[in-house]
Structures are given as structure tokens and as C-alpha cells.
Amino acid sequence: MKFSEPLIEGRLIRRYKRFLADVRLPNGEEVVAHCPNTGSMRNCQPENARVWLSESDNPKRKLRYTWELVEASPGAIACVNTGRPNAQAKHAIEADVIPELSGYRQCRSEVRYGSEKSRIDLLLSGHDREPDAWVEVKNVTLAEGAHGYFPDAVTERGQKHLR
């Protein structure tokens, strides 16, 4: 995964109110970072974990930093920012990097469908030989060995995604 600017490494102090995390930067400064992941992230909050933040100079933002990555266990990096995987998947599809999804001329994001008024992450259309492809992308923060699991906790929202 490529980031437009280098990430800032820090150490996790704590995550709270689901959207906030206190992080200690290498110079000792403690900052509050936005946590864009609404999940439980049970396995992604070890005390003093290495974390990486992106920084914004947008004066309209309430928080300057966004929590992007965490070292969930030694050598295992998890993406905390749930918006990143969708953009990465869309880029890979448009670049024809995924053979099973190549040949589609149109890729639309967040398309509504169904009685639950859900949104699919990507709708691929315009293939000469294949029907439209509905693609759901998941950011996985629960892993056991080489297997990732979604959702990371039992929730109504997670059940809706699985349906």
C-alpha cells in the first residue's frame, strides 16, 4: 500500500470512544488521532503497540492525525483505516491486476441495492463476455495464523454485511 506522504510512527496509548486514539510520538509528544475503524478491533490495540499515522494540514479537520496502521502482533501489520482497502481494490481492478476481474469497462463505488438499502463497495459492468460483478471489500482486523476473519465481533452491522 502506498501513501501520498510518509507515515509518522508512534506508540498506542489507548483507543476510546471508538473514533479516538491517544498516541505517543517519537519526540514524546502525545497526540489524539482519528480512528476511522468502527469495529471492535480487539486484536489491534495491544498496549504500547507500534502505530502509523497520516498527517493532514487541512484547517477544517478537527484532528490533525489519522490512525492508518498498527502492528497487531510482532511482524503482523493491520490496516486500521477502513477506507484504504476499497481504494486499493478499485485501483487494482482498474489497472487489470486481478485477472478474474479484468475486462470491465466501468467501476462504480458504493452502489445501493436490496431491501436493506445496502451499498456494495464496487459494481463492475461493461464486460464483453461476463455479467456485472458485485465486489465487496473487507478490511480485516482479526487474524488467527494465516487466516483473516470478518467481522471481528458479533454486531448487527457485521451480520448485515454477511447477508
Image (cartoon, rainbow, N blue to C red):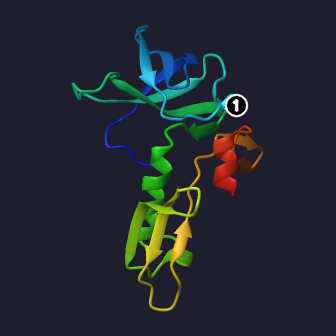
Say what amino acid the circle numbered 1 marks.
Asn
The image position of residue 149, as x and y in percent, is 72, 47
Q: Looking at the picture, tell me which residue is in the foreground, 130 or 10.
A: 130
In the current view of this chain or complex, which residue is farthest to the right? Answer: 145
Q: Residue at x 29, y 26 (%)?
A: 61
Q: Determine which residue is flagged by label 1.
A: 43
- Against 48, is 66 above or below? below
Q: Is residue 150 visible?
A: no
Q: Looking at the picture, tell me which residue is in the foreground, 5 or 154.
A: 154
- Against 7, is 30 above or below? above
Q: Is residue 68 visible?
A: yes
Which corner quadrant holds the C terminus? bottom right
Q: Residue at x 55, y 19 (%)?
A: 17
The image position of residue 73, as x and y in percent, is 68, 31
Does residue 91 appear to the left or right of 61 in the view shown? right
The image position of residue 134, as x and y in percent, is 54, 69
Circle 1 sits in a helix, a strand or a loop, which is it?
Answer: helix
The image position of residue 66, as x and y in percent, is 41, 29
